[in-house]
Amino acid sequence: MISLSKKYLTSIEDLSEDEIRYLISQAIEFKTKKSDNGNNNQILAGKTLALMFEKPSTRTRLSFEAAMYQLGGNTIYLNANDLQLSRGESIQDTAKTISLYVDCLVSRVHSHNTIIELSQNCKIPLINGLSDLYHPCQSLADLMTILEYKKSFKGLTLAWIGDGNNVCNDLLMGCAKVGINIRAAIPEGYEPPQHVLEVVTHESKLKQTDFTIVREPVYAVRNADVVVTDTFVSIGKEKEVDKRKSIFIPKYQVNDQLMSYSKDNAIFLHCLPAKRGQEVTSEVIDGKKSVVWDEAENRLHVQKSLLVSLLI
Ligand code: CP
Ligand code: NVA
């Protein structure tokens, strides 16, 4: 087992390529129960994880809670609205307080600045469970799913279709770090932030892989090995719903016609929750290329891997 160089995970940028590969291989061991650290052992006995969430969650909350229970630990779920934080207590004081009682904190927040402040003030490991900018745990599960189906990252091309959002930001950085070629079809004005573009460009150059942003989804999907999309209206963007639907749905929906340009053995990923009929049709998400349920399951395994690496 290796310890991670940083005691927090704010975005996939915090992990080296070796650390990403190690976390995934350990997750695969958890999944296949080959390792001594397989399911139902007590490796995290006596450890407590707090989950402080400002936004709803199904998969992230459930998979972290299940991961802790299956490894012998405990969890405490904190709706941020129920904390004194909602009455003006500072993030700094909240972080210092939480650190007195538990061993690790997963937080889902509106503003990524909150994650940064938590990481600077927590005395315990901190994991970003989704911010407006990043979703590192999702990226790890996505890379694990790609590796399971494709056996190697080498030579693969991933097509991202739609919004340059939090899931996109970390997935693109993760793909670039492990050497996957990237073609992202994103409308003008919805691209990832400059910093993410710089990291992806830099990592792609190091790996001698391709990274391009295009406007036409067909250019991105043609001969792709992996096709990925996410909601066009992330949490916090609800006021833009009409504008976003009119820009995205007619051109950036992943449907059977668009998927037909991908390789015959291509896989389709979506972090879920999906808005069927918007960013993806039911025929695709329920179709033969879709691996979204393996992807969702893998959240459990990568999070076990992450927790063990941060806590042991
Ligand atoms: N993919 C994901 O993070 O799902 P939840 O919002 O349900 O946690
Ligand atoms: N981009 C989505 C991901 C949800 C898991 C959102 O931020 O709402």
Image (tube, rainbow, N blue to C red):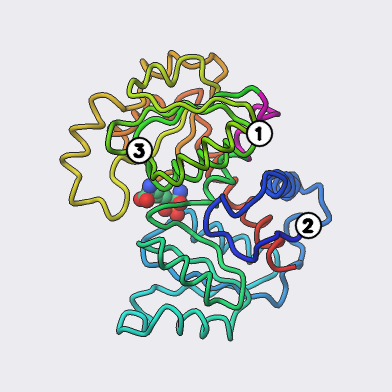
Q: Give the range drawn in magenta.
A: 144-154
CA gap, disc 1 and disc 2 = 20 Å
- Residue 212: image quadrant is top left
Residue 196 image offset from top left, x and y in percent: 46, 44
Q: Label 1: which residue? A: 147
Reading the chain from its start, which is encountered first: label 1 or label 3?
1
Reading the chain from its start, which is encountered first: label 1 or label 2?
2
Say which of marks 1 and 3 sits in front: 3
Which label belongs to residue 191? 3
Q: What residue type is labelled 3?
A: Glu
Say which of marks 1 and 2 sits in front: 2
Q: Label 2: which residue? A: 2
Residue 34 image offset from top left, x and y in percent: 81, 47
Which label belongs to residue 241? none
Mark 2 touching mark 3, by CB under 8 A? no
Residue 221 vertical position relative to residue 84 in the rendered view, above or below: above
